[in-house]
Image: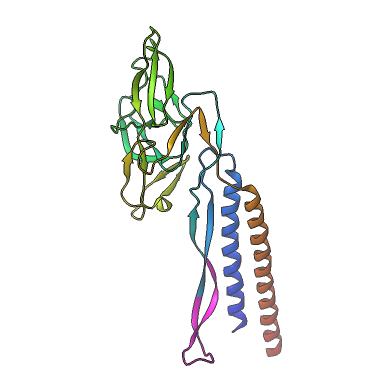
Amino acid sequence: MSANLTLYIGASGLKTFAGAMSIVSDNVANAYTTGYKANHARFSDMVSGYMTTQGADAERQGCGSSLMGVATNFSQGPFLTTESWSDLAISGKGFFNLKQLSSDGSSTVGNTFYSRDGGFHVNKSGALVNNQGYAVLGSDGNMIKVEANPATPVYGSFSVTPEGIINGTPLAGGDPVTVGTLRISSFPNQDALVRQGNNLFLPSSESGAVIDGTANAGINGMIIESSLEGSNVDLASEMVDMIIYQSDYNANSKSVTTGTNMLDTVINMVR
């Protein structure tokens, strides 16, 4: 193994653990992001030429490591109680469905996004939306409007059942009226969902076809009213990973330093 290869192997380790450290830093930064799912680095080795061994076959020579990918941990986050009926959390599997509103707010446009962040509110048009103004979709695939005209409200209060049924209690009195039912979707391989930012995901070719349904049915979890799902980041584990990655980074820097000293020795011999 040449001194040059030692330098490249050490450099690959530096790049790998720098990337892993950025993933840990992202998790720590999102320790209090609603519905956030922690990510973890996946490493792989790299090989180059062949080396002779004591066996009959040759062995591939190692040439460092690389960051193979990022795996998302979709385990349940803690529930945070709020005072708003429109703050909703899913206890179990499943995702809320969201779509961008048109410029006049009368319809939805673009792709359907999926999220575990149930921090919703009612906008000026009476539609249930998230903090970015994306409309929450009902079981029929359309936006949920809890009030036809918020300027002259019909309902005094709202409640949401574990099945995701939104009921409004009329101001004039009487029994609650169903104003919408949440669509909750799941995927054969949720680990392959693509993170989009703003607590949103999009499906990929590997996630499989979306399975649309409702809460508390099939594999979908039930709805928890007046609650939000917190981040599932374990700060203690992240701190341990950070220490390990930093130590590995320092060790690889020593490999680079040693490789440099070996190369200097060769150059000095030529002189």
Q: Extreme top residue here?
A: 172
Query: Residue at the location (54% across, 58% down)?
Result: 41
Residue 49 in the image, given as x and y percentages of width and height: 49, 83
In-image side of 79 versus 250 (left or right):
left
* Left or right: where 189 falls relative to 230: left
Camera-side residue of 155 and 161? 161
Q: Percent from the top left, x then y, of residue 130? A: 44, 31
User: What percent of the width, then of the height, locates residue 139?
Assistant: 31, 33
Task: Tell me which corner region of the image, top left, top right, bottom left or bottom right, holds residue 151.
Answer: top left
The quadrant holding residue 166 is top left
Above or below 209: residue 137: above
Q: In the orientation shown, which residue stands out farthest toward the left?
A: 140
The coloring applied to the image is rainbow
* Residue 51 belongs to magenta span: yes
Magenta segment, principal secondary structure?
strand
Q: Nearer the viewer, residue 139 or 153?
A: 139
* Total marks in image: 0
Q: Is residue 90 left or right of residue 143?
A: right
State which region is magenta: 47-66
Residue 268: x %, y % from top left: 71, 86
Q: Quadrant of the N terminus?
A: bottom right
Residue at the image point whose x is 67% and y is 86% from the top: 266
